[in-house]
Amino acid sequence: MTRREMLARTGLAVGATGVAAGLAEVLARLLAPEPPILRSAIFTDNIAEHYSMRFDELFVRDRDAFWRLAPRKRLPDDAWPLRGLISNGQGLREDHEIAERKAEDEIRILFLGDSCTFGYGLLHGQTFVELTERLLRDGPGGRAVDCVNGGVPGYTLFQGLRLLETRGFAYRPDAVVLSFGWNELAERDGASDLTHHEELRETTPPGPLAMSRVCELAWRAWRRPERPDAVARRPRLVPHEFRTILERVAAAADRRGIDVLLLIWPSSENLRESYITPLQREQYRFAASRRFGPGDLPAAVDGVAVLREAARNVPLAELYIDPIHAAPRAHRALAEALALRIGPWLLARSER
């Protein structure tokens, strides 16, 4: 056999192998399409039970955070309960793109949270994130402050950590404001968010192989973890897991010189009586161990105290849309408290 014949046969073999691999990939995608991530499926199924809108179209799968906002989405302003501007091209609830390179005098604050931070039932301009930005810009010695809304409906603190580590730090925030503590209490199945994430990691092929459905199916068949017997249902995060993740967020932020502030989100039950959830209690303890800005104040804005005070003069119906989600009037009160707390921090930064 001549050298030319050998090269020709090799080329044919390589080509045939490539065609076979491509055909296998097409068949795998047609016959065994990628299933939704379990946590994502539970989330969208839960939405479908309560609302007629196909909210699953507003979210995309995410192997780190289970789901995230799909880019460039908008709903009618009179839609319900998600309304108006939903996301920019980066999957953030912002009306502009967030440049990774900041201006020298710009202060950037990244807000991470769930549907309360996102602004469930509110237009973009009514959220406490947007209102805090306006108050800080218009206040004494107003600065070029950009408050970035990274809230995502359904998120837990664990998902907030994953978003921060995979995308949030790339925006070069000077501070991160966290507001979580309600989705964590949901009992969806017998595993925590941490367990689901570990199972995803173990069943996802490394590197570019993750792009192939054939490789993914083979990898899952080989690496499928055996979950130990678990209780039928358990919260997505229990208090000690929540506290551990708070500490992980703080450690990651500290390494980058980023300050952390908690907004302890109040439910309507917090206002009716002296009621504090176990996860709120963990936030109070965590905030007491840290400082934000000058002085000796804890690293938290106590939203429970803010709205208890507001409820002295305002009917509860004007403060809440439902037991968890706040109405525009409550968002204004929380924004005022945040601006009051962040203002001295801004001033101290400008004097450095």
Image: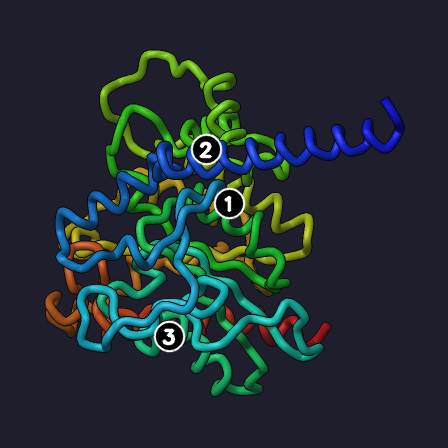
- Asked if the residues shown at circle 2 and circle 1 are in contact, with their CB atoms under 8 angstroms apart, the answer is yes
The residue carrying mark 1 is 162
Q: Residue at x 66, y 73 (%)?
A: 102
Q: Is residue 90 above or below residue 28?
A: below
**Which one is closest to the eye, mark 1 or mark 3?**
1
Please name the amino acid that badge 1 sits on. Answer: Arg
- First-in-chain label (1 vs 3): 1
Q: Quadrant of the N terminus?
A: top right
Measure how far apart labels 2 and 1 are at the Cα level: 10 Å
Q: Is residue 22 visible?
A: yes
Left or right, 66 with respect to 175, comes to left
| Mark sitting on residue 325 | none
Q: Quadrant of the C terminus?
A: bottom right
The residue carrying mark 3 is 336
Left or right, 36 with respect to 25, comes to left
Q: Is residue 338 visible?
A: no
SS class of the residue under badge 3? Answer: helix
Q: Is residue 10 above or below residue 41?
A: above
> Mark 2 packing: few (<14 Cα in 10 Å), some, or many (20+)?
many
Q: Residue at x 15, y 74 (%)?
A: 313
- For the image shown, how many numbered marks are present on the structure? 3
Nearer to us in this view, 18 or 271:
18
Nearer to us in this view, 257 or 183:
183
| Mark sitting on residue 197 | 2
SS class of the residue under badge 1? Answer: helix
**Which one is closest to the eye, mark 2 or mark 3?**
2
Please name the amino acid that badge 3 sits on. Answer: Glu
Indicate the position of residue 268 as horizontal and vertical percent values: 18, 56
SS class of the residue under badge 2? Answer: helix
Q: Is residue 271 above or below residue 207?
A: below
Left or right, 241 with respect to 231, comes to right
